[in-house]
Image (spheres, rainbow, N blue to C red):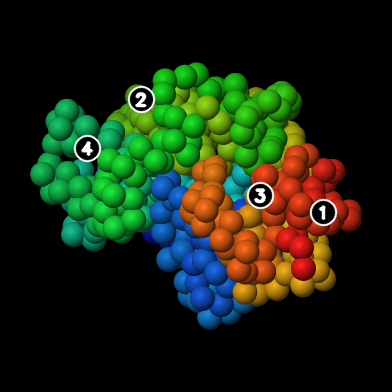
Amino acid sequence: MSSRAGTLPVVASCVLFASATAVMVPVTLGLGWDEVVYVSQHEPHGPAAFMSAPRAHGVTVLVWPVASWLDSIVALRLFLVTTAAASLGLAFWVWNRLLPHSGVASVAAALYASLWIALFYANAAMPNHYTAMAAVAAVGSYLMAASDRAGPGVYLALAVSLAVAALMRPADAFWLGLPLLTASLAVRRFRRWPLAAAAVAGLAAGGVPWIVEAESRFGGIAERLRQASAVQGGTTPRFALWQVMSTLDGPILCRPCDSPLRWPAALWWVAVAVLVVIGLWAARRTGAAPAVWLALAVSASMAFPYLFLIGYSAPRFLLPSYALALVPAAYGLLVLLRAAPAHRRVLVFAAVVVALAGHVAIQVVILRHVVSEQQRGRSDWARIARTLHSHGVRPPCVVSGHEAIPVAYYAGCRAVEDQGNNRNATSEELQHTAATTSFAYLTRNGAPPGWARNWQRVPVQEVSHGLALYLPPR
């Protein structure tokens, strides 16, 4: 297959991905909680939000070209749609020469682009899509580097891909690098010192900022890991498959995970499992088994912590695993279509088209619901910010309490917490701040702390039930 023939379908998948995102996810959608943390690190957006131990600065670097000088949600979203589509194309293009059937890369990219999770986060200032694309590119580059014809550029691509993954999400990069380095030690065809060296160099380069920050802010790597584990509720053995499945149709974060599982949202899991089995069977017959098995091994490795070590879930956590698993699934789908007997090929093709149409319809319904919920919640934050301004809480100001980080961002204030996962002050420091600065405390279905019990309660109109502001006496 020529380079041009393999590239054009991947480019088409990227264009469809960007177009679908632009239509389904408004570029005017306000920033979500995690986005606020990353984007607020740049000067035009007011005080920087607290970066807790599990977070890394990859997204902050990603949004720098726009967020560092322009305070525009629309410009940021359009920029991120472009980078998301470009990363999709680069990641899957690597696979063009790795599997015998032409079109695997473009089909895998299209299948990934059909997921509501991928579409929702395509224009988001979040790390998971880029970690997923880095993982796909890293595994593909690793396989190409293991061939006898690999040039220096392939090793560089492997190192850069792993560096991007480590910069975005160091913990995910660990589970990405583990099976690759294990294969370099245990599998004869991958036992090449330049291969292992490139992988180690990439992981180390991307992990340096996280390590430096661990030493400067958290008292060392071990202490940062301890704090990160505490923020995540402890990383102990558990079985979280049900929690993961319950988020397949939203919410975008469940903590605790008590939402019911709606089975139509999980049907694509079954379809992908069947296609992966077909892909494995076909790969054994065509000599592509090492590529397929490595993609699945890395997919399983990156899913492991979210299935067996943490007790909450978000659908974006498994984007890297989905992206990698869709490579053998796409291979299986093409084998299914091409291996069908001539007299049944039309019937098989029609069945596949109907199944894909049903899949896309389910994903669109879920995406519309998720977007609607997020628009409502983020509008609430903007409404609370306007209420704060109307009561004289204006920059420079401080917000504490329920959802303080996003509300503070929308109001142009600084968020200060003396408890919870985003604790960045002691109770004494918080009380001193409240006495000397324009201050507001937010509660939901509860009362403020004792030192604020005599404050004025200001209900917020047209937002979620039970939310109230408490302001100090004038």
Q: Which residue is disc 2 drawn over? A: 285
Mark 3–mark 4 Cα distance, whole angstroms, equals 54 Å
Q: Which residue is disc 3 drawn over? A: 451
Residue 267 appears anywhere in the view: yes
Measuring from the top left, give residue 103's x and y in whole percent. Answer: 49, 46
Q: Which residue occupies the extreme left position in the image?
A: 193
Q: Which residue is disc 1 drawn over? A: 457
Mark 3–mark 2 Cα distance, whole angstroms, equals 72 Å
- For the point 59% across and 48% down, the residue is 118
Which numbered disc flags the more N-terminal residue, 3 or 4? Answer: 4
Label 3 with label 2: CB-CB less than 8 Å: no
Of badges 3 and 2, the one in the foreground is 3
Q: Which amino acid does label 3 sit on?
A: Trp
Of badges 1 and 2, the one in the foreground is 1
Of badges 1 and 3, the one in the foreground is 3
In the figure, is residue 51 to the left or right of 255?
Answer: left
Q: Which amino acid does label 4 sit on?
A: Leu
Mark 4–mark 1 Cα distance, whole angstroms, equals 58 Å
Q: Which residue is disc 4 drawn over? A: 181
Q: Which residue occupies the extreme bottom position in the image?
A: 69
Measuring from the top left, give residue 72's x and y in whole percent. Answer: 64, 75
In the figure, is residue 377 to the left or right of 16?
Answer: right
Measuring from the top left, give residue 411's x and y in whole percent. Answer: 69, 67
Which numbered disc flags the more N-terminal residue, 1 or 3? Answer: 3
Mark 4–mark 2 Cα distance, whole angstroms, equals 27 Å
